[in-house]
Image: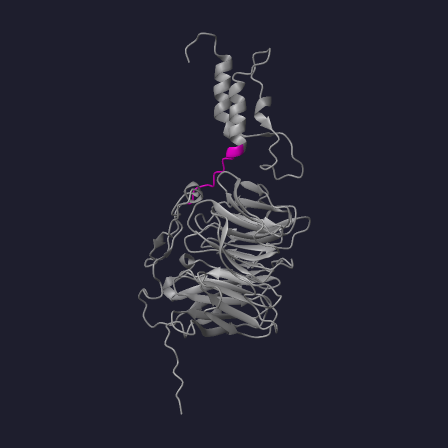
Amino acid sequence: MFRRVVRASKFRHVFGQALKNDQCYDDIRVSRVTWDSSFCAVNPKFVAIIIEASGGGAFLVLPLNKSGRIDKAYPTVCGHTGPVLDIDWCPHNDQVIASGSEDCTVMVWQIPENGLVTGLSEPVVVLEGHSKRVGIITWHPTARNVLLSAGCDNLIIIWNVGTGEAMIQLEDMHPDVIFSACWNRNGSLICTACKDKTIRVIDPRKEEIVGEKEKAHEGARPMRAIFLSDGNVFTTGFSRMSERQLALWNPQAMDEAISVHEMDTSNGVLLPFYDPDTNVVYLCGKGDSSIRYFEITDEAPFVHYLNTFTTKEPQRGMGYMPKRGLDVNKCEIARFYKLHERKCEPIIMTVPRKSDLFQDDLYPDTAGPDCAIEAEDWFEGKNGEPILISLKNGYVPGKNRDLKVVKKNILDNKLSKNTEKRGPANKSGRLLLLPYLTHNTAAHAGPSPGLHFDLQLWPVIMADWAAALQPAGAPC
């Protein structure tokens, strides 16, 4: 008789624990939109939750310590004219968050240091380029101010947020709705899952598909695809018999999966969350009341089931804390923010250890908040690996700089026009401000576009005034 050998793993005994009621966020009207995003985004400072909002789209941004019952009058981020479908915190600035909406726009917001005191309706920048609702938002992992958005127009746009420009448009690659999009570890490639049941690995700067697998999962329900740190692609989907599946693929040889696992017959879409430091994937099914976790290794069967954390109530969505936001003194290796119908419940995953010392094997150096390269470098073809930090003494957040947006394409035109009109004085000797007023709809979040004054032009205006008021022949 064979004795079954249990595979040794330090994550075998990971256990989940929901926090007590006073540490939850209560009385929140979580969005009811029928879109398969996580509806929640978390970083070491804030938790953001998409909520029901009359007459437009809104989301809450709560400081992590603001637990308990949330007042109905608590200020929201509310600049969209349609429901918000996806949100994502900038990995390089804990006060910057991007949102995509049914109103076809992407908006980028700067949250005040200590959270919102009044409602926020003016984004730092509005990114317009999609013709249908925008359901996917994801920041570049290592380049500053690079943002990817995917819409129901089957179009992927990669933006330089610092200039408000759409730099890359990936058209005609996806014949149907895009279900998910994910950057690889250094942001040189993206992988997508599409309604045509195809997984694609794309080089966005060359605008070419470098690997694809048709019928990666044969079921008709939505798929998800994420990159792992070794460059392989992990997918979740459904079989022809509507069983939930997970699979592992090598982008260089996508004919056959490295590994395929059948799970169960539930119909909730599996949202994968991946920790590159421990190589553990957590699967949170929408409508499930459980979180399953798996370890990915180099030995067959490559995807090893670890355990399942189960609660009584189903989840509407899920937020996943970056590694630098965890409590290393408690051997916490993951923290989720589970959305119920009316509340958000933190769940911590812990590895039981007897020692109080820092556990090096659980916390290798992890991606920090500093970006490796600037947006312009990335668009020119450079790559940068994540800049790693040690969590040995805990993560101490630094000062975030404000997001500055200089609309190059709009601004350069204005500057050239205004230099031709140097010193445009009227009969009374006063400088006319009219040349500096423009119909700048992109910077205007209100219901109707109008004339707007661009503060970026202030130095030019001052120089024009000086030139206009200076007597002829006088020295500058």
Q: In which quarter of the image is residue 357?
A: bottom left
- Could one spot residue 19 in this view of the protein? no
Would you say residue 458 sits in the magenta stretch? no
Q: Which of 78 and 419 is in front in this view?
A: 419
Q: Nearer the viewer, residue 385 or 284?
A: 385
Number of on-image labels? 0
- Magenta stretch: includes residue 404: yes
- The image shows residue 68 at horizontal and vertical percentages of 54, 60
Please identify the residue farthest to the right as the structure is shown. Answer: 55
Which image quadrant: the C terminus?
top left
Percent coordinates x, y for residue 406 in the rendering: 49, 35
Above or below, 240 relative to 176: below
Above or below 282: residue 436: above
For the point 37% across and 55% down, the residue is 395
Magenta-highlighted residues: 400-409
User: Left or right: where does residue 378 sit relative to residue 53?
Assistant: left
Place of residue 273 in the rendered image (x, y in percent of width and height, measured from the top left): 48, 63
Q: In the rendered view of the protein, which quadrant contains the N terminus?
A: bottom left
Q: Can residue 343 be seen here?
A: yes
> What is the quadrant of residue 425 in the picture?
top right
Given residues 119 and 219, the one toward you in this image is 219
Q: Nearer the viewer, residue 73 or 462?
A: 462
Q: Predominant secondary structure in magenta?
A: loop
Q: In this view, does 416 lie to the left or right of 85?
A: left
Q: Position of residue 338 (x, y in %)?
A: 54, 64
